[in-house]
Image: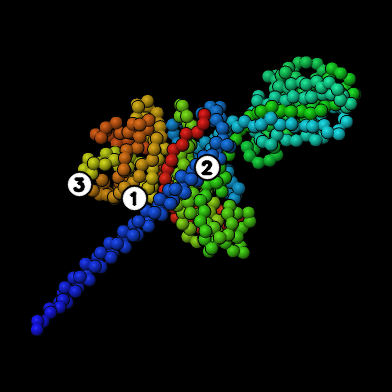
Amino acid sequence: MSLRRGFTMVEVMMAVVIIGLGVLGLLALFAGAARQQQLAGQQSSVMQATQNALARMEMRFGSITPEAVGTQFDDGVWYAAKSNGEAFGDQIILAGTGSGARDIYSQVQAEPLTLYSRGTDTTTISTFPCGPGSLPPVMNSAVDFGFRRLEPDSVVLTAVFASPAGGTETQVTYRRATDPTLDGISQPPNFIAYFPDGDASVAPPNYIVVDIQEDPPEGIPLAALRGMCLAVTTDPTTTVLERIDVGSFLWRSTTLLSLRDRLIMREDPAVGGPTWPDPAPYGPGQRPEIAFSLLYRRTATASQLAVVSYTMTPATVARPYVPPERRTNIYDGLTPSSDSRVAPLGFVNMTLGWDTTEESYYLQTTNSAAAWAIEQGQLLLVQSGPDPAGGGGQIGSDHAVRVVRSITGPRTDLTPPMPSGTIRAYLDDSPRANFRSYLRSRTSTPVTVSVWAVRDSVESACGTCGDADRWRLRPLDIQVIQLNN
């Protein structure tokens, strides 16, 4: 009878260690796969939300005219779109950088509209005299244009006259005159007079006044008829105004997207309660998981938007998220120490160079307050840098780059070496403008660029919540989209 030899304790322990390492490896693999699946799901959500937002922007935002941009924007430089307030209905709009910079607009075409229809009204033209010193009233049943900030030269009015009993109608076309005179009537800046075929010299006086509602740029009231001084070749005591039509016209839009358009929600039963504010950008039981902000630039041939998406995690889940995106949040609060209400996107100045030792492009700064901008995984879009074509101007990059690794100085083993207090971030590619690297060669002297990046955290600007909740942000994607011009 032979004896069977068993496993020694050492063998058992080695087997347990090997099996444990295998199990840990499998767990890490599953965790990595789950993380990749989550990222893929987020990327899919971002792509869908971006396409939906683009469709909305195409409907709301037409071509951006050179007159709308003026000289407040440098061609090729990326500027942040701002919010026009801190309420739940805020719209994100395009704006210049300075305190006196005006918002830019696009021209949007509106459908033809009937502004006045007589119906049962028997008021004759004789009740609307053209006496000097006061603006004639508007007839009943007049409606507004449905929009603000009309382009005055695009408005063409057609007045249809007839007798109360019916019969032949007479149509008169009213256009804006180059030098209108309204019998000494003082016109507010928003009031524009329209004359038969644009001729203000025809007697007797005959015009229609429209309030185009130029300022403020958004809100109410809407553009509307404000007065009519009507003259007809027939007897004014037996002639009535049947209707006033306006053909297709242009109005100036500054609105891009609402806050609701820029949030991707997830279910969260912990959100909300009896103190939930009303109105709110979303209801109880939901919280935003992904949001995006917008950058804008105009080149010599196109207008472009950069859609910057980021994930967000609240410090608490009791309050809504409203991004602080006023002009001052974007351009004045450049570091957390200067303004606790900084915008989700911030820009900082960096040095772009080539590390011969690591064989990689890098961005470098000595500003410790800007370390958030070059953490590992950060996405960067150059706001402005020296034109690689050598034109002498500044230009933003065509695409984003990602930070793959960050280190701190001193590091004398690198070329170029890093002094003490320096932070260097290695990139997955060189930032490029017009398909050219900002560094003309790898041996070129480092250049200074300004970069946009997603901040690590922001304080919600929920003005009616009375809270100071912070949200932790993580960059997800930057897509550059060309607008219709």
Q: Quadrant of residue 444?
A: top left
Identify the residue at image location x=52%, y=61%: 268
Q: Quadrant of residue 26?
A: bottom left
Task: Give residue 376's mark.
Answer: 1
Marks 3/1 in contact by CB < 8 Å: the verdict is: no
Looking at this view, name the residue that lies furthest to the left: 1
x and y percentages locating residue 34 in the rendered image:
37, 57
Residue position for label 2 = 53
Work out whether mark 2 precedes mark 1 in sequence or the reverse, and give the earlier one: 2
Give the distance between the C-alpha atoms of the residues marked 3 and 1, in whole angstroms.
Answer: 21 Å
Identify the residue at image location x=66%, y=31%: 111
Type of amino acid at the residue the image marks with label 2: Ala
Q: Is residue 183 visible?
A: no
Q: Nearer the viewer, residue 342 or 211?
A: 211
Type of amino acid at the residue the image marks with label 3: Asp
Task: Give residue 413's mark.
Answer: 3
